[in-house]
Amino acid sequence: MYWDPDTVSDPLDAPLLRNLLAERFAALRDERALHMGARWYTYGELGEHVGRTANALADAGARRGMRVGVMLPNGPEFVFAWLGLAILNVTMVPVNVHLVGEGLSDIIHGARLDILVTDSERLKQARHVCNPSEPAPRVLVHGTGGADSFDRCLSRAATTLPMGTPASMSDDALIGYTSGTTGPSKGVILSRLAQFWHGANYYRDFVRLGPGQCGYTPLPLFHVSAQGFVLGCFLGGAAVVIDRTFNPFTFWHTIREHRAESFNYVGAMISMLWRRPSRNDDWDNPAVRAVGSATPPELHEAFERRFGLQLIETYGQTELAGLWLTDPPAGREIGRVGVPCRWMDAKVERDDGTTASPGETGEIALRSHHPLLMTTGYFGNEAATAHAFRGGWYHTGDAGEQDTAGSIRFVGRLKDFIRRRGENISAFEIERAAQSHAAIREAAAVAVPSSLGEDEILLAVIPEENERISERELHAHLEPRLATFMRPRYIQIREEFPRTPTQRVQKYRMRDEWLQSEHRPIGGQAQANTKQARAFR
């Protein structure tokens, strides 16, 4: 490791990412750096591809102050474009490859892209949403001919790293769009300083790998969690294996094949891996630690024992970049997201802005020790920025409670809270109780109107494949697990939920469906595709 974040007391005392990358490419030229598809790239080869891509983008007109969208699936082309833009000091706007229609238009036009890099498979999606009345970005396409063939641009470009334009840690490195579970997505601006420390803190706190070692991620590169993990590997001089997508059937084979010692995850991955049939050699794998969030508390220690590794739970958002809540250095508490990392303060706030008492539920609010370490705001949305940062604290929109030692427990999304019979109810707690039934794969609890005022609770569930469960059976399962006021009035068995392109459940659409449907009780065994609900009292 040529630059050690442990020795830094001031976060501004950090090199530019592009300078450190250039150092890695040269000093570790023959070391393995990146595995994607069917081949390995050494650090030297990675540097040449990044240099060629950066030069091709510069030849296409990319300059400091511009915004370049990257709409590519997990693959080497994404990595080359991402790091090439960092070398050039041009702002990257990663675009979810599953977006279509208004969601895609919101980014292409909302971010005012100058250039969009995509592939032939997604070209139609992009062209379909280009509005003739608004300025359209130049589209560079992998895998096709013509004037805007990016392959042609690359074939003419040099492999040496360009000098790029003068850079400052305050320059915009990234505009990452939120998932849009509660409304239109917002463009989160992250500075060069935030981008650097995102990777450096991943290396310091979680990845902890150096030359000759290997990490693994199957998460999408258009999200900051995968970007942070990959940067953490590169900054340590380690190799990283990046999969196209998460596959529970091949996950452990890949870990073993490449001797990966660390990986990152989301909670659904842990549940899916846990439900695979047990093997006598589950523990016999090279993974030492994994970092992620939303592991079901009841699986946490059992998963660690079965697979012989440590799960490191964190709490973070796109807005926070490399700042998060995580286990304190001395011990951990399963079910809590932990204490703030260095360079960040945390509290739980009441509706009136005062600090909640220990054990009292309120909104999780965070404050960075330097404004550039987290988002500086939402692109083109001053009102949302002002609301999020009221009182000098970033308000997460998440509910939590804090104990006397400062450790925070995540309770749920504030907009998922349900007001019933004078009580505030967390949808998260209802969903967790429902998912404790072996036949339930996924659950979503939603507030729906009550004739008595306040809310009633609709619980919608998706059964496991080849499993059947009735609403009455599920209601009986919940009775001993939930207080009376928390038990759902309506239960609905479904095949699928409405989702964002990042596969998060859009509960506001479920409420809209409810308002447009008939809410009569239905009898007999529920079919998996019903959108009616059975009522309980």
Image (tube, rainbow, N blue to C red):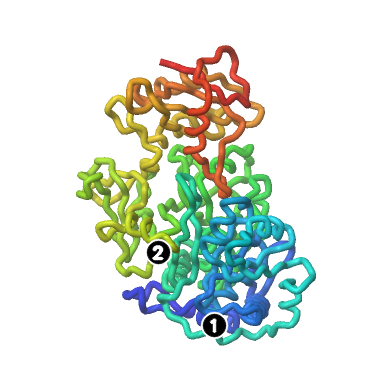
**What amino acid is labelled 2 in the image?**
Thr
Q: On screen, 444 above or below 233?
A: above
Confirm or deny contact between disc 1 and disc 2 (CB under 8 A): no
Q: Residue most toward the front?
A: 133
Q: In the displayed structure, does residue 461 sit left or right of residue 52? A: left
Find disc 2 in the rendering and name its residue.
375
Given residues 328 and 349, the one toward you in this image is 349
**What amino acid is labelled 1 in the image?**
Glu
Q: Is residue 97 visible?
A: yes
Given residues 345 and 130, the one toward you in this image is 130
Q: Could you say whether the residue bearing mark 1 is in a helix, strand or loop? A: helix
Asked where in the image residue 439 lies, by quadrant, the reply is top right
x, y (%) of residue 215? 57, 62
Q: In the displayed structure, does residue 349 sit left or right of residue 372? A: left
Q: Could you say whether the residue bearing mark 2 is in a helix, strand or loop? A: loop
| Marked residue nearer the N-terminal end (1 or 2) | 1
Q: Nearer the viewer, mark 1 or mark 2?
A: 2
Q: On screen, 30 above or below 453?
A: below
- Classed neighbour count for the residue bearing mark 2: other residues with Cα under 10 Å, few (<14), some (14–19), many (≥20): many
Residue at 41% x, 78% y: name it: 14
x, y (%) of residue 525? 60, 16
Q: In the displayed structure, does residue 363 sit left or right of residue 60? A: left
x, y (%) of residue 85? 57, 74
Quadrant (top left, top right, bottom left, bottom right) of the C terminus = top left
- The CA distance from mark 1 to mark 2 is 27 Å
Q: Residue most toward the top?
A: 523
Asked where in the image residue 123 lies, by quadrant, the reply is bottom right
Find disc 1 in the rendering and name its residue.
23
Residue at 40% x, 64% y: name it: 375
